[in-house]
Image (cartoon, rainbow, N blue to C red):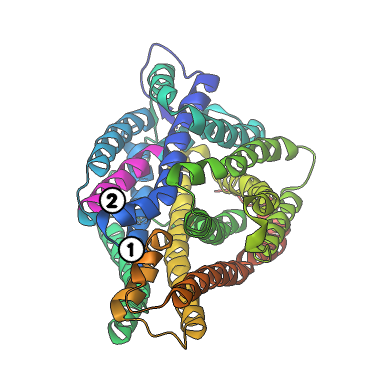
Amino acid sequence: MTPVSSSHPTNPRLALIAIAAVFAILNLDITTVNVALVTLGKDLHADLEDLQWGLNSYMLAFAALIVAAGRVADVFGRRRCLLAGAIVFAMASLLCGIAPTLSVLVIGRVIQGAGGALMLPAGMAIISSVYSAEERAVALGTLVGIAGVAQSIEPLIAVILVVALRAIQDSRDENASHRIDIAGVVVLGTALTSFLVGLDLVQGSDRNPPLALGLIVLSLALLVVFVIIERRTTNAIVDGKLLQVPAFFCSCVASCFLGFVFFLFLFMVAVYLQEEFGYSAFTAGIGLVPFSLVLAVTGVMSGRLTSRFQMPTLLIVACASMALGLAILSFVPVSYGYSGMVIPFILIAAGAGPGFTLLNTVGLTAVSPERSGQATGMIYMFRFGGGAIGVAAASELHGAFFQRHLAFRLSETTLSFAQQKLLEQPGATERIGNIDAGLITSQVELVRQAFHESFAAAFTGTLRLSLIWPIAIAILVAITLRSKKAKTGHI
């Protein structure tokens, strides 16, 4: 890794603050959109299945572009890409803020994803370049912690970023190819989009099973084409040699699984707090503060614990905590209210925080600093690709469970198509009273009760199915990271 000419060397502590500010911006953006989905649904007259694109369009762009962005950072300079990404992200945020329709919002979110993809691998590469392998785990853990706390001081983030960037010396990989794998980016992005659109058409108001099947088959075919392209190009966005390193392979695949279950959880909980408990978007955001704080604290702690405990042990414990939290949350009765959700929130956060930190450390420790930009991009491509699929799966599974339970509970009550559609839209709890045309008072109350019971049943059913992913991560870690080759492999 070659530093670009500068009068000042990089200050590690200020660099850490700057990159933490980047993480805070990206984390806050995802959290804000999650809790705002119900309000957006009311304002833009969209149902939950459509609104998931407000989140997924961002993650799709992020996943498809981040590896190429890592290569761009390696070639043209990490600090330069960090600044360019921040500018793009800020402009896209303005577009999202004034979006009059869901389509404009989705376009803004795609541009935001592109800006985030420019910032993150550049920032992680900077951290990898200024901290030694022994210090990197602590630095990455601290990064997660600072970012989590910084979400509560958003107005100061821009100031911190501008001041801290003055202490970062630009650097690049002089041996990196200047060619970008455009074909790989396009094919991968098309494959992911096709798959998610196919899932969206499996059920719901725009249900079209034949087209859904065709799009899912197309996405699988495109993934095969993507693999062929990556094997034949010398500047692949997904480097097969990196994936041959067991520790890095484990980091990528486990990040995909963790992204799937983490973003599924955030999406489901944000909607549940508003639909089931009647919280506003602001109140739902406040309700997630304990989760964010524990995520931050445990992220810092896990980085420091790597000097005392083996990495596989820490990751397996984190997976166990997350699985236990999801299991408990899926059995908490609605009558317990928000207070019954706090302990499961803490357990899930205590698993996710260390999980993200430790998987980053595992992956970046397995590669040389010169490859850190591309390596970071690959890890986050898997993470956000898994997250996008997780959000889509959450929407589809919840919708399927909800409709099945609602049909059973309302089997003796006749509702028109328009009335049924109303129950499926965000904010339905505020509009249930509008379906009383032709119904007596007792029937209206029956519909209200059926809605809440069905929504709760759909929430718990989706959470229980998601338990498989932290268990899968633990098994993968136990098999992969405990091997002798995983401990010695490095590229």
**Of the pair 72 and 31, the residue shown nearer to us:** 31
Q: Which mark is residue 106?
A: none
Q: Look at the image and tell me in which quarter the N terminus lies.
A: top left
**Of the pair 70 and 272, the residue shown nearer to us:** 272
Q: Which residue is mark 1?
A: 188
x, y (%) of residue 365? 60, 43
Q: Is 488 left or right of 202, judged from the image as shown?
A: right
x, y (%) of residue 250? 60, 58
Q: Is residue 112 magenta?
A: yes
Above or below for 159 versus 403:
above
Q: Is residue 217 visible?
A: yes
Residue at image point 31% right, 44% down: 112
Q: Mark 2 belongs to which amino acid?
A: Val
Residue range highlighted in magenta? 104-119
Q: Mark 1 belongs to which amino acid?
A: Leu
Mark 1: which secondary structure?
helix
Magenta: main secondary structure equals: helix
**Of the pair 120 and 28, the residue shown nearer to us:** 28
Q: Is residue 315 magenta?
A: no
x, y (%) of residue 218? 30, 78
Q: Which mark is residue 110?
A: 2
Residue at image point 46% right, 30% down: 21
